[in-house]
Image (cartoon, grey):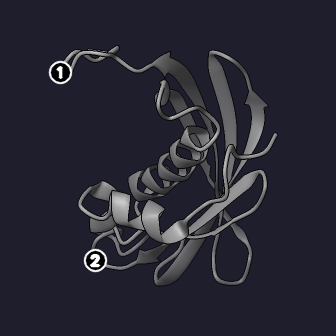
């Protein structure tokens, strides 16, 4: 499996700037032929009240990376991907710094995709392992009429 076209990281980051992705400080940093990597700061935006990286922030990073990677595998003029299910195992606490996530495809099919996202701390130790299932859906031809409600 490879992405459908070379990845323009600046365009990907600009596209996500005014969304949850931008508000959490998530930045897509690297892309290979079949993987996508990004970072997220561990700061006031992403910590829970006890000073640790919030599990929901880790899941947001995982879903961001998996969904963006999944979208790069379909013909964006005709199809889009939407999340069906995500799970996460939180393995290690982080109090500060930056975490890095890498999304790799486990399955790329016509109607579904499954991605594994590994999030690590600055020492390269696993913080969270997540699995994301995406549905591949046809884009609607009429504005305002989506495929999901």
Q: Quadrant of the C terminus?
A: top left
Question: In this image, 50 relative to 131: left or right?
Answer: left
- Which of these two is toward me, 121 or 140? 140
Visible in this render: residue 67? yes
Alpha-carbon neighbours of circle 2 within 10 Å: few (<14), some, or many (≥20)? few
Q: Looking at the figure, which quarter contains the N terminus?
A: top right
Q: Answer yes or no: do the residues labelled 2 and 1 have beta carbons within 8 Å?
A: no
Residue drawn at (46%, 60%), measured in percent from left and top? Answer: 12
Q: CA distance from mark 2 to mark 1?
A: 35 Å
Q: Circle 2 — which element?
A: loop
Q: Tell me where residue 48 appears, x and y as whole percent.
A: 32, 65
Mark 2 / mark 1, whichever is N-terminal: 2
In the image, taking residue 43 as reference, residue 115 lies left or right, namely right
Expressed as whole percent of the image width and height from the top left, the position of residue 94 reads: 53, 74
Q: Relative to 142, does residue 104 appear above or below in the rendering?
A: below
Q: Is residue 18 above or below residue 116?
A: below
Residue 104: x percent and y percent? Answer: 74, 48
102 horizontally vs 43: left or right? right
The circle on residue 144 is 1
Indicate the secondary structure of the residue bearing disc 1.
loop
- Quadrant of the rendered image containing residue 43: bottom left
**Residue 11 point in image, percent of width and height:** 44, 64
Which residue is located at x 36 percent, y 66 percent?
14
For this orientation, the residue located farthest to the right is: 1
Residue furthest to the left in view is 144
Query: Is 123 situated above or below 109?
Result: below
For label 2, the residue is 44
Q: Nearer the viewer, residue 34 or 127?
A: 34
Q: Is residue 92 visible?
A: no
Q: Residue at x 40, y 21 (%)?
A: 139
């Amino acid at each position: 499996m490879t992405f459908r076209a070379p990845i323009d990281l600046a365009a990907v980051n600009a596209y996500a700037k005014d969304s949850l992705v931008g508000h959490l400080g998530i930045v897509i940093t690297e892309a290979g032929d079949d993987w996508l990597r990004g970072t997220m700061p561990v700061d006031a935006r992403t910590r829970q009240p006890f000073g640790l990286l919030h599990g929901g922030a880790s899941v947001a990073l995982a879903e961001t990376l998996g969904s963006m990677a999944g979208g790069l595998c379909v013909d964006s003029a005709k199809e889009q991907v939407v999340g069906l299910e995500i799970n996460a195992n939180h393995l290690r606490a982080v109090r500060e710094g930056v975490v890095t996530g890498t999304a790799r495809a486990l399955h790329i099919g016509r109607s579904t995709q499954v991605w594994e996202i590994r999030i690590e701390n600055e020492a390269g130790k696993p913080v969270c392992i997540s699995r994301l299932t995406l549905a591949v859906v046809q884009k609607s031809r009429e504005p305002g009429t989506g495929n999901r409600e």
